């Protein structure tokens, strides 16, 4: 008789087999049998332990919880507390902003708002720690979850990390004093986990997120480092952005230092090696967070973002009433500067987020036609957006179908 495969193994296996894993780490919070590790193609993926006896009742509970929480299985649009934008999701208030402290603003990828909010919430004892990510001290070309408890630790984690990291694997769920700074998929998984566990809104931690274009493979970073003349294993420092806005990609082994502009490093290298799940993402702007922050680029006459160096500036979205109140308090305390902003003004300077939302139905359809399961997305009004331009939807479906078939053939 064939040995029974545990229900959790089957659920996780389906997500992996269909390239729907985002590497968020939520499954590690669900089961002690799961750990996150780097996959052969350079992404964070769950690994299930084998060899031990699995309790059937616990296995069923964990599988059911996984199916409700994993963003590779489903994402339900969050409850709207204020208004809703067709591209950028729910909001209570929208601002243009930046960190008041010059050092924080300079070191941050955008305007330093998330770092400033982290510092201020710790100082004000709104939280006693925050989970985020930073360069691994012993190998700075890689990224790891970190616990932030001081201003120095907040500054150490400032700046984007365009590499795979499972922040939720380092987060203490269930403790309202432990905040989270995470990618949109991590924040949506955290929110759905708390929904599934029945945690009341008043007992939930503060969730901060940012606009995300996707997660590149670790091997994309390693290749870029080598291109600049540095062995990834010998690097003593590396940053993707920060140190100005948008900042430069810089790596050093102590003897050799190499750098590239943001447009070069992201646009021509890292951004071309994204994991598959990111290409069918329903939420790249942190809709489940209390506060979400993105680059508020200046634009040319055609509306295309300019990546010229300057003082960091962000669009800051209060997604919840709590997020709105926290921003107001932080501004009054002098931690951040915020000015009201019309959300439609963000559309032309975030073209990737707009295009992905408008063509998502086509890309999901293309994946399905290629024989792949896709996550369930509900409450986002995707069909309405797709029907506005059926030609674009059809092109997206055909392109995704062809790419999916090529990828399947390459993996055989």
Image (spheres, grey):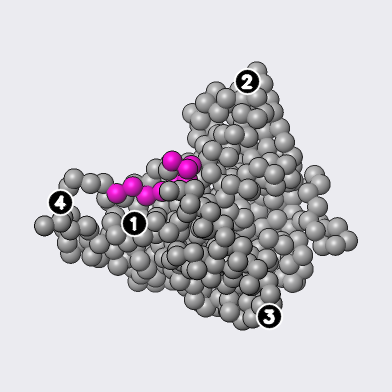
Q: Position of residue 67 (x, y in %)?
A: 35, 66
Q: Position of residue 253 (x, y in %)?
A: 61, 23
Mark seen at residue 13: 1
Q: Do the residues labelled 3 and 4 touch (CB within 8 Å)?
A: no
Per the image, label 4 sits on a secondary structure element best described as loop
Q: Is residue 351 left or right of residue 145?
A: right
Per the image, label 1 sits on a secondary structure element best described as helix
Measure the alpha-carbon separation of dots 3 and 2: 54 Å
Residue shown at 80% from the left, 44% from the top = 309
Q: How many numbered marks, from 0 up?
A: 4
Bounds of the magenta segment: 40-48
| Front-most of residues 15 and 313 | 15
**Which residue is under mark 2?**
254
Q: Is residue 46 magenta?
A: yes
| Front-most of residues 152 and 250 | 250
**Which residue is under mark 3?**
388
**Which residue is under mark 4?**
53
The quarter of the picture where the N terminus appears is bottom left
Measure the alpha-carbon separation of dots 3 and 1: 36 Å
Res. 300 in view: yes
| Dot placed on the residue nearer the N-terminal end, 1 or 2 | 1
Measure the alpha-carbon separation of dots 2 and 4: 50 Å
- Characterize the local packing of mark 4: few (<14), some (14-19) or many (20 or more) Cα atoms within 10 angstroms: few
- Characterize the local packing of mark 3: few (<14), some (14-19) or many (20 or more) Cα atoms within 10 angstroms: few
Per the image, label 3 sits on a secondary structure element best described as helix
Q: Is residue 24 left or right of residue 250?
A: left
Measure the alpha-carbon separation of dots 1 and 2: 43 Å
| Dot placed on the residue nearer the N-terminal end, 2 or 4 | 4
């Amino acid at each position: 008789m064939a040995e029974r495969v545990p229900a959790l193994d089957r659920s996780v296996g389906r997500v992996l087999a269909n390239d729907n894993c985002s590497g968020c780490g939520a499954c590690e919070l669900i089961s002690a049998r799961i750990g996150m590790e780097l996959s052969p193609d350079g992404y964070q993926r769950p690994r299930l332990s084998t060899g031990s006896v699995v309790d059937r009742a616990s296995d069923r509970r964990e599988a059911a919880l996984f199916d409700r929480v994993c963003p590779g299985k489903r994402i339900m649009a969050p409850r709207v507390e204020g208004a809703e934008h067709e591209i950028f999701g729910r909001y209570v208030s929208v601002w243009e902003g930046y960190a008041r402290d010059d050092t924080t603003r300079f070191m941050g990828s955008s305007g330093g708002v998330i770092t400033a909010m982290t510092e201020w919430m710790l100082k004000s004892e709104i939280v006693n720690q925050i989970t985020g990510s930073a360069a691994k001290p012993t190998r700075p070309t890689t990224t790891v979850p970190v616990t932030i408890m001081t201003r120095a630790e907040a500054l150490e984690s400032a700046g984007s990390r365009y590499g795979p990291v499972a922040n939720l694997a380092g987060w203490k769920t269930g403790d309202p004093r432990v905040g989270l700074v995470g990618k949109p998929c991590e924040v949506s998984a955290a929110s759905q986990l708390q929904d599934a566990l029945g945690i009341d809104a008043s007992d939930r931690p503060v969730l901060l997120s940012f606009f995300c274009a996707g997660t590149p493979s670790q091997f994309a970073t390693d290749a870029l480092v080598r291109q600049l003349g540095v062995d990834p294993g010998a690097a003593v420092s590396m940053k993707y952005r920060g140190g100005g806005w948008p900042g430069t990609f810089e790596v050093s082994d102590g003897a050799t230092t190499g750098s590239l502009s943001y447009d070069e490093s992201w646009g021509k290298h890292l951004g071309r090696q994204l994991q598959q799940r990111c290409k069918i993402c329903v939420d790249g702007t942190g809709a489940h967070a209390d506060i979400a922050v993105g680059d508020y680029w200046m634009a040319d006459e055609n509306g295309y973002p300019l990546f010229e160096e300057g003082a960091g500036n962000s669009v800051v979205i209060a997604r919840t009433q709590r997020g709105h109140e926290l921003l107001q308090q932080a501004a009054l305390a002098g931690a951040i500067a915020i000015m009201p902003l019309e959300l439609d003004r963000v559309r032309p300077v975030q073209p990737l987020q707009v295009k992905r939302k408008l063509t998502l139905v086509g890309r999901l359809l293309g994946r399905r036609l290629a024989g792949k399961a896709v996550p369930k997305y509900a409450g986002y009004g995707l069909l309405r957006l797709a029907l506005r331009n059926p030609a674009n939807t059809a092109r997206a479906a055909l392109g995704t179908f062809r790419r999916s078939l090529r990828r399947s053939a390459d993996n055989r």
